[in-house]
Image (cartoon, rainbow, N blue to C red):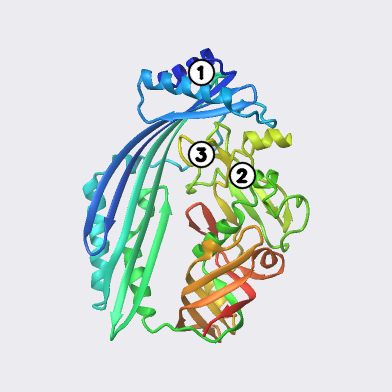
């Protein structure tokens, strides 16, 4: 706090008209494993970013050395850069509305106090479970990360906020091999709390998937109803919508959702929200990276587009209030609006019921390549690495190597037939299992 105050004071003394200090300390545990623990690292980092303005001229300078001398130099350099920077005609001022929302479930005290030996024991037990599942299976790669971060924001208007957060993420892959045929199975999980992770269960599911898909094959190209598993659809949702719902994209003319407020952009059963206060959400926190309180923001309600996501800069530019969505990729970066927990609200139907009422179709378990889809045009392309043919309401033949394509925005309007009740996340994106009426399948 003292160094943050010093940085702001020095920046003002050097000629800044306003200044903001952003400090972040992170302790991260990083474990890599395969059929045994291969590496174990504990990384501690700290960073100080100073954003200054001289009227409408802006600059940022940062340091990872927190000393009085370094902070003073950062302030001097930031002001020097601002003096020669071009004016931003849209700049008004830094965020002045600090506060905290009612967000709960973003810090795990148990994780803070956990012994590393307990994590190693649990991971080792999971690796053994995978090995024991089937003689044809072996663990091939996995990553476990756990982080504890402390963030402080302070500005020249006398505002300040501080928060602590925890994050845990696990990804593991199993490989099965028999008579020259090979297959893999992966599982991933991103949560806030240690008790929410079941490593042995993940290991068994990955091994089971690898074995089941040893004889997977493509089918002929055709149009079929497609059921997309919750985590897969959550990832697609984030890839396509995260940028277009941002006010920054809208103001820069990049978003296909510009000028769409209060218009019908999806079917009436579609509700999409961004909830920075979601209990235990992956990016849940009490305030954003400018100190503004987080909130629950309705993006699409009954198919009607309702809101964009704002930080203070984009909000002031549009003469509206921030939605508490300022994010910094790193401590040395300027904030930009981005979703916190982007969610397609679930329906009432279980995945089992959705499958049971499908006479013929495809169930998608895993895909790759969806990150190459185009959020501007909405063109969705992904390769199914793990899927099943559905025949008479039953999962039958394992499938792989099939490309699905379509337009996401058209799908939102009239392509989603059923929305499941099994909400799950892929990082900060949340969705249930969904059934699409018909989509193009490019097979053999």
Q: Are marks 3 and 2 in contact (CB under 8 Å)?
A: no
Compared with 415, 400 (above or below) is below
Q: Nearer the viewer, mark 3 or mark 2?
A: 3
Left or right: 439 as drawn, with respect to 213: right
Local crowd size for mark 2, using a 10 Å CA cut-off: few (<14), some (14–19), many (≥20): some
Lower position in the chain sequence, tag 1 or tag 2 = 1
Residue 344 x/y as whole percent: 60, 58
Give the residue displayed 63% in from the left and 66% down from the top: 379
Dot 3 crowding, Cα within 10 Å, few <14, some 14–19, many 20+: some
Residue at the spot of label 1: 11
Kindly identify which numbered label has been placed on residue 316: none
Q: Nearer the viewer, residue 104 or 7?
A: 7
Report helix, strand or loop for mark 2.
strand
Q: Determine the CA span between mark 1 and mark 2.
A: 35 Å
Q: Earlier in the sequence, mark 3 or mark 2?
A: 2
Residue 348 in percent (x, y) is at: 60, 65
- Quadrant where the N terminus is found in the figure: top left
The secondary structure type at the circle numbered 1 is helix
Determine if residue 422 is in view: no
Residues at circles 1 and 2 in contact by the CB criterion of under 8 Å: no
Disc nearest the viewer among 1 and 2: 1
**N-terminal of the two: label 1 or label 3?**
1
Q: Is residue 96 left or right of residue 264?
A: left
* SS assignment at label 3: loop
Q: Residue at x 24, y 46 (%)?
A: 116
Label 3, label 2: how far apart the Cα atoms are: 20 Å
| Disc number lying in front (1 or 3) | 1
Q: Which label sits on residue 328?
A: 3
- Reading the image, the residue beneath label 2 is 296
Q: Residues within 10 Å of mark 1 (few under 14, many from 20)?
A: many
Vertical relation: 106 (above or below) 131: above
Report the front residue among 182 and 172.
Answer: 182
């Amino acid at each position: 706090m003292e160094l943050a105050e010093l940085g702001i004071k020095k920046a003002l003394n050097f000629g800044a008209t306003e200044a903001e200090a952003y400090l972040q300390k992170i302790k991260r545990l990083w474990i890599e494993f395969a059929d045994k623990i291969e590496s174990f690292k504990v990384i501690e980092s700290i960073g100080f970013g100073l954003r200054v303005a001289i009227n409408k001229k802006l600059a940022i300078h940062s340091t990872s050395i927190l000393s009085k001398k370094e902070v003073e130099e950062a302030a001097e350099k930031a002001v020097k850069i601002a003096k020669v920077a071009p004016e931003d005609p849209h700049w008004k001022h830094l965020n002045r509305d600090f506060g905290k929302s009612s967000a709960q479930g973003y810090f795990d005290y148990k994780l803070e106090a956990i012994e590393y030996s307990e994590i190693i024991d649990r991971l080792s037990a999971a690796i053994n479970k995978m090995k024991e599942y089937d003689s044809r299976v072996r663990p091939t790669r996995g990553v476990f990360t756990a982080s504890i971060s402390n963030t402080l924001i302070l500005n020249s208007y006398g505002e300040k906020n501080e928060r602590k957060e925890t994050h845990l993420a696990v990804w593991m892959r199993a490989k099965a091999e028999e008579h020259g045929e090979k297959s893999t199975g992966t599982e991933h999980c991103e949560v806030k709390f240690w008790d929410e992770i079941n490593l042995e269960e993940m290991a068994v599911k990955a091994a089971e998937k690898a074995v089941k898909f040893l004889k997977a094959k493509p089918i002929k190209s055709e149009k079929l109803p497609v059921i997309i598993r919750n985590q897969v659809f959550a990832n697609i949702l984030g890839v396509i919508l995260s940028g277009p719902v941002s006010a920054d994209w809208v103001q820069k003319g990049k978003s296909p959702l510009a000028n769409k407020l209060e218009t019908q952009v999806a079917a009436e059963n579609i509700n999409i929200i961004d909830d920075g206060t979601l209990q235990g959400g992956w990016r849940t926190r009490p305030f954003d990276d400018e100190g503004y309180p987080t909130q629950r923001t309705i993006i699409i309600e009954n198919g009607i587009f309702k809101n964009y996501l704002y930080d203070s800069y984009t909000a002031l530019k549009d003469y509206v209030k921030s939605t508490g969505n300022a994010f910094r990729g790193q401590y040395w970066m300027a904030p930009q609006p981005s979703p916190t927990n982007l969610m397609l609200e679930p329906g009432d139907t279980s995945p089992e019921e959705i499958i049971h009422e499908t006479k013929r179709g495809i169930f998608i378990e895993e895909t790759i390549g969806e990150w190459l889809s185009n959020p501007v045009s909405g063109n969705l392309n992904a390769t199914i690495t793990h899927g099943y043919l559905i025949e008479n309401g039953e999962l039958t033949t394992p499938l792989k190597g099939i490309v699905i394509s379509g337009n996401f925005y058209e799908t939102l309007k009239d392509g989603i037939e059923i929305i499941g009740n099994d909400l799950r996340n892929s990082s900060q994106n949340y969705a249930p299992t969904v059934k699409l009426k018909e989509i193009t399948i490019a097979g053999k």
